[in-house]
Structure formats: structure tokens, C-alpha cells
Image (spheres, helix red, strand yellow):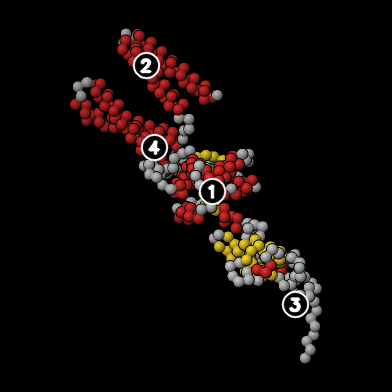
Amino acid sequence: MLLSLLRIAYVALLIGMAIIAAGFFVEANDNTALIVVPLGILVIGSVVLFTDMREKQKQITTISAVYFGLLLGLLLGYLFSMILEPLVAGSFDKPQLLQLLRVLVTVVSCYVTISTLLQTKDEFRFIIPYVEFSKQVKGGRPLVLDTSVIIDGRIADVCDTRLIDTTLIVPRFVLQELQAVADSSDKLKRNRGRRGLDVLKRLQGNPKLQLQMHDGNVPELRTGERIRVDERLVILAKALNARVVTNDFNLNKIAQLQGVDVINLNELANAMKTVALPGELMPVRVVKAGDQIGQGVGYLDDGTMVVIEQGRALIGQEVSIVVTSVLQTPAGRMIFGRPDQRTSGSHTPYPGGAAAPGDSKSGGSGPHEPTKG
């Protein structure tokens, strides 16, 4: 509503200026200017208004660059005119030609400064310290989501816990990649892409979450070069002073090499898994045979693989095992153990891995019989 009122006031101002200009030239009996000047005012004003209405998504960085470029161009044009005017004053017979030179120098200066700032607005702070054309983000540093973490879907579950209180950013090129995967002829890829779109819809429907679609161009793509989505994500995160959320191992390494903070959901999931120490007891169901002779394999509720020595004969049973070692790998955590010989059919772990008092199979409970010589 406010924008509509502003545009109406702008049109009324243009019409008023055209009427005033027409009245001025009527008094001067200048019929040519009477038509050209008011018509020029209306045409130029209409072009500006049409451009404003057509470009609905405007970037503050571009507007700032044009504004500062125009100011700098006018200043440089004025200075250059003052320098050139004494040098060429004798070369022009008519003052109108000298005035035309001033206008030409000013127009060229404005074009050069605006063009330069539009192409280098992201590096402008290196010219004038503490000044840069970048959006100021309130609150914590935003999180830029990549395609893999959206398709994975766990980011929506993490957001439901209200652990994330900062803005999530989905770049337009990531959304385009998701749509391309969802339209794939391969059924598996198509299902993964549609799952990713469903996850985005779920994130948008979270009232406690701030989700933004980033429509801006990546700063370093000024020359039109085509680069991979991973590299574009890193460049965008650096420009926004944001962190990247991903499950991609390669993207993780690329971002770290370029000084961009990364949150890997796989690492977060591993950090939240149950800690198992050697000697502890835990119940686990043996579901299949292992790679080695006699081994059985089971899984905890969080998906952690448990390798059980001499567990092949226990497939299909839930047994209590003693943890012997824990192996941490980039892919996750593996627990190694053996069936607990101290429990007789009971799979309830005893605190600290110690045997229950009075357990005859523990070998260490109850009073010891004296050794006969």
C-alpha cells in the first residue's frame, strides 16, 4: 500500500513538473521547447517507473553501488571539467560546445564509476576500510544448506528440536539442482529429489524457523564462468559470512580449505550416539553373520553397528555383550564385543559392567573357597 502511494505521488510530481516547464516556455514563446521539455520529463520519468515496477526483486548491494557510483561520477566529472576547461577553452568558438564537453565528461565519469562498482562491489571494503556493500545479518551467523543435507532430511528433525535459532538460507541454484533431480528419468534419483522438495516444504511450514531463498548472484560469477554447485556454495557462504551445512565429505574439505565453517550432520549424529566404554554391558539383537568366522552382527537403536565375537550361533537372539573395543571412523562408530558369560539368560546390564552379587558364573562373586594345600 505504501509503495503504491509513493508511485502515485511520483507520477503526480512528474505531471506537475511537466506543467510548470510548459508554462515557462509558453511565456518565453519557445514552441519547440514547449513540446520537447515536458515530453522529455514524462518519458524519462515513465521509463524509471516502468523499470522499478519490472524489477521487483532488488538487491541493496546493487542499489548502493549505483548510488555511490553516481555520486563519485558527478564529483570526478566536475573535477575533470575544471581541469579541461582552461586547456580547451580557446579551441571552442561557441560556449554551447564547451557546455556539451562538460556534460560528456560527467556522463562518461558516471558510467565508468557505476560500472566499476557494480563489478567490484564485493571487494569494495579493500578500497575503503569498514565500508562494503553487503547485507547485515541480525542474530547468529546464517546456515547455507546444500543439496545433500536437504535430501537427507535430518535437518528438518534437528530444526524441530529448536536447536537452530538462526536463519537457514537455500540458494536458488540448490533449489534448481533439487528440481533437476526430482525430474530425473531414474526412479531412485527422482524419489530422492522429491524427498528433498518435501523436506523444504516442511522447513517452510515450521513457524519457529526463518528460511530464506537466496536469489542473488554468486559474487565471483561476474564473468559468466560456470563452476560446480559445491564451489558456488563456498563462495556464497564467504560472501554472506555464513556456515555451510552438508553431508558431503568433499564439500566439507573444500570449505575448510577456504576458511568457511562447516556443520556436518553425520559428525553431529556421531557425536550424539551412545558412548560405549570397554567392559560395559549392553543388550543387542544379533541379526546376521559377520565377515569373519564365528562373528555375528547387530545394531543399536541409533544405527551403530555391533560386531560380536562367537555370535554367529546367536543369530535371531537378543544377548548381553561385553564391549571389548570401539572403533571411530569417518563413516561412523563400530562397537566390538563378545557374549557375556556372567549372565545366565538375563540381558539387563549391570552398572559399570560388574557382575551382580551372588552370580555364580562370574567367577569373582561370593566368598572364595580356601585353597587346600
Question: Residues under labels 3 and 1: Cα distance?
Answer: 55 Å
**Quarter holding the C terminus?**
bottom right
Question: Residues under labels 3 and 4: Cα distance?
Answer: 80 Å
Question: Residues under labels 2 and 3: Cα distance?
Answer: 106 Å
- Sooner in the amino-acid sequence: mark 3 or mark 1: 1
Residue depicted at x 44% and y 40%: 217
**Which mark, residue 363?**
3
Which residue is the site of mark 4? Answer: 118
Q: Secondary structure at mark 1?
A: helix
- Sooner in the amino-acid sequence: mark 1 or mark 4: 4
**Which mark, residue 188?**
1
- Sooner in the amino-acid sequence: mark 4 or mark 2: 2
Residue depicted at x 75% and y 70%: 343
Q: Residues within 10 Å of mark 4 (few under 14, many from 20)?
A: some
Q: From the viewer's perspective, is 85 left or right of 317?
A: left
Instruction: Name the amino acid, label 2.
Output: Leu
- Sooner in the amino-acid sequence: mark 2 or mark 3: 2
